Amino acid sequence: MKIEQIYTGCLAQGAYYIESEGQVAIIDPLREVKPYVEQASKAGSTIRYVLETHFHADFVSGHLDLARQTGATIVYGPLAKPNFEAHIATDGEELQLGSVKIRVLHTPGHTMESTCYLLLDETGKETALFSGDTLFIGDVGRPDLAQKADLTMDDLAGYLYESLRTKIMTLPDDVTVYPGHGAGSACGKNMSKETTDTLGNQKLFNYALRASMSKEEFIKEVTDGLLAPPQYFPQNVALNKQGYESIDTVLKRGGQALSPDAFEAAANETGALIIDTRPAQVFRQGFIPNSVNIGLGGQFAPWVGTLVPDVKHNLLLVCEPGQEQEALTRLARVGYDQVLGFLAGGFGTWEASGKESDTLLSVSAESLANRMAEGELEIVDVRKPGEFAAEHIAGVRNIPLEYLNDHMAELPKNKTLFIHCAGGYRSMMAASILRARGYEKLVDVTGGFDAIKKTGLFEITDYVCPTTLKKA
């Protein structure tokens, strides 16, 4: 028996490859399925099942392409109603895979169809739990994504409480937990950087699994502090439930190398959004006017999903030469399939063509401190509310990047805005968006709050532990 976690850091997502006696099950695959097919082929094995823990909101699963290419059966738990052929398993049903079995555990709460898969080894011992978005390391799935007219967030949280206590916490402590996500995912709020753990350890340290916790306490704590989910989430759910184009088709369409003239014409004729995926400090030195910087080096796809509300929006890409396919693949993972092409040769060819370009100013944290000593500045902190509440420059404005579009009118255009985040990735995104909306007086603070704090030159609010904030 073989279990392999295939973890994708930029999505904070875990897919799983389980193999026994020449038969394979893939759990929650990414959209690009070639690696799974090749791995099984190399082992001389056949992919028999594609197990889906639920209709994912934060990425487009590869279940359809994988089933088409291998003949594998797509499996969902009870209550799932996909628009394609799939096996809807019953609660407690066992699927034979070589010499092992996989037991279906219906665990509603994150969504109503949410299901965990329990692996029983060759002796029948309960060995591993593939917990999807029901149980994370350090957290549980958020219960607000599948709300309906007759189903509130508190209702879902109540279902989740029962699922955890009747289906999961009753399992042996030595069962290994393999979650669907880790730290950085928007599917939970308190996830650990660790990507596996024993169930017994989670019973000790996961706040949501406290033995003494009442349902009312659970509902209050699990729903406390949830930020609004990215707007692309329900669109990804629809794609996973209804179907989508093959990723090969998507990559071929987006893989067109466009000359500067063709690129400019495509932008003007279609109204496509230009996304520049280069590092922040490279972008600021020169970029196409009205382009938005979302660096490929960070959580690129989730930020595109947060800042570009419609997955069907036409897109054009500016990348470092050679990174175009990576950008296209990451966009396809979250359903952004309408890429019309990329700038051949990157920004250098645009510059060489003599076309108009723009720049953004940047200052060091030390320089910012010197300017503050000379007079009042308009500083905008674009970190998340929890980051800001924990510690920030005294007296500055907080507009989290994910809410920038909603609060842009609050920012004056006649004053210079000094923008910072934690390290510089998000602040350049914010500055590029503001510049595209007509803000001319913008300065990015290099190194963000990390650099600001290290100088010792700023009045910083007293540190408040996020855990203390939650209890207040």
Image (cartoon, rainbow, N blue to C red):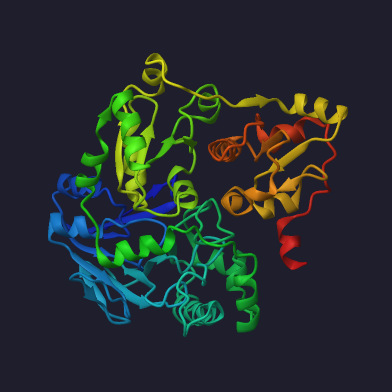
Residue 232 falls in which quadrant of the image? bottom left
Quarter that holds the C terminus: bottom right
The percent position of residue 178, horizontal first and vertical second, equals 42, 60
* Left or right: 67 as drawn, with respect to 406: left
Q: Is residue 405 left or right of residue 18?
A: right
Residue 246 position in % (x across, y down) = 20, 51
| Relative to 358, 45 lies left or right | left
Query: Where the N terminus falls, by quadrant?
Result: bottom left
Find residue 132 and report its horizontal and vertical position in percent: 41, 65
Place residue 439 in its image quadrant.
top right
Q: Find the residue positioned furthest to the bottom.
A: 150
Seen at 43% across and 73% down, the residue is 111
Up the image or down, 102 lies above or below 20; here it is below
Q: Is residue 179 visible?
A: no
Residue found at x 42% / y 46%: 301
x%, y% of residue 89? 26, 78
Q: Measured along the vertical axis of the image, is residue 452 above or below residue 467? A: above
132 and 376: which is toward the camera: 376
Q: Is residue 266 visible?
A: yes
In the figure, 433 relative to 206: above or below? Answer: above
Q: Seen in the image, is 197 located left or right of residue 345?
A: right
Q: Nearer the viewer, residue 319 or 33?
A: 319
